Image (cartoon, rainbow, N blue to C red):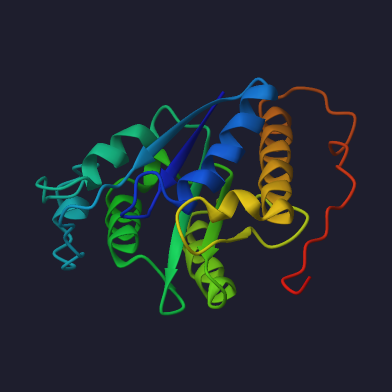
Amino acid sequence: MKVLLLNGSPHKQGNTAIALSEVAKQLESEGIESEIVWIGNGPVRGCIACRQCFTQKLGRCIFDDDVCNRISEKFTEADGLIVGSPVYYGQPNGALLSVIQRAFYSNSANIAGKPAAAIAVCRRGGATATFEALNMPFQMLNMPIVTSQYWNIVYGHTEGQAALDSEGMQTMRTLARNMAWLLRCTDGHPSPGRPTDEAWDAMNFIR
């Protein structure tokens, strides 16, 4: 089984990458393969609602001059999806939203019904709004949303600070264990119940 992780930050090795890497490491320990795919920092088209992907039954976006279709092609081999984004003005990265909207609409047949989760990474505020926005497309495609011990939010400002958010990192590991558990359940493996949680590592801003 394999989980596709989308790094929706323009910074390839930034705080979003740290959050996703923590998920990937835990998935590996659970025997689940993962691949982190960076959307890059190049131009990304927005959907123009031409519906050519739908009317021509292309299975891809009609525009093939950015990263969208390269990511969409990976839906076929993925059993689960996790999307991570930084928070910009209380919203996900615009380029990431464009990729999701176009890839989901043009290639929904290869992602619908697969377990999914969203991760929001922020300096301080706006994370819950970003988290909600990223989850909404999953619900339209009957994708079971994988939860954790808290909302999937990691805090960090300058590059590398996310690793210092001990509770956020724990939330990522719990998310990964829950994803692995759900994938095994849907693959017909007998399950003794939910995975065992770590002891809660509460972290507050004010020390």
Residue 97: image location, x then y, percent = 34, 63
From the viewer's perspective, tell me whether residue 124 is left or right of residue 191. left
Q: Relative to 110, does residue 28 appear above or below in the rendering?
A: above
Residue 71: image location, x then y, percent = 30, 40
Looking at the image, can residue 113 be seen?
no
Of residues 5 and 73, the one nearer the viewer is: 5
Q: Relative to 108, does residue 97 appear above or below in the rendering?
A: below
Q: Residue at x 67, y 48 (%)?
A: 169
Q: Residue at x 30, y 50 (%)?
A: 103
Of residues 89 and 83, the one nearer the viewer is: 89
Total marks shown come to 0
Quarter in which the N terminus is drawn: top right
Of residues 24 and 82, the one nearer the viewer is: 24
In terms of image quadrants, where is residue 190?
top right
Quarter in which the C terminus is drawn: bottom right
From the viewer's perspective, tell me whether residue 58 is left or right of residue 35. left
From the viewer's perspective, tell me whether residue 12 is left or right of residue 129. left
Looking at the image, can residue 166 be seen?
yes
In terms of image quadrants, where is residue 105?
bottom left
Q: Residue at x 74, y 55 (%)?
A: 167
Residue 54: image location, x then y, percent = 22, 53
Residue 86: image location, x then y, percent = 44, 62
From the viewer's perspective, tell me whether residue 169 is left or right of residue 90. right
Q: Residue at x 17, y 52 (%)?
A: 42
Q: Residue furthest front?
A: 207
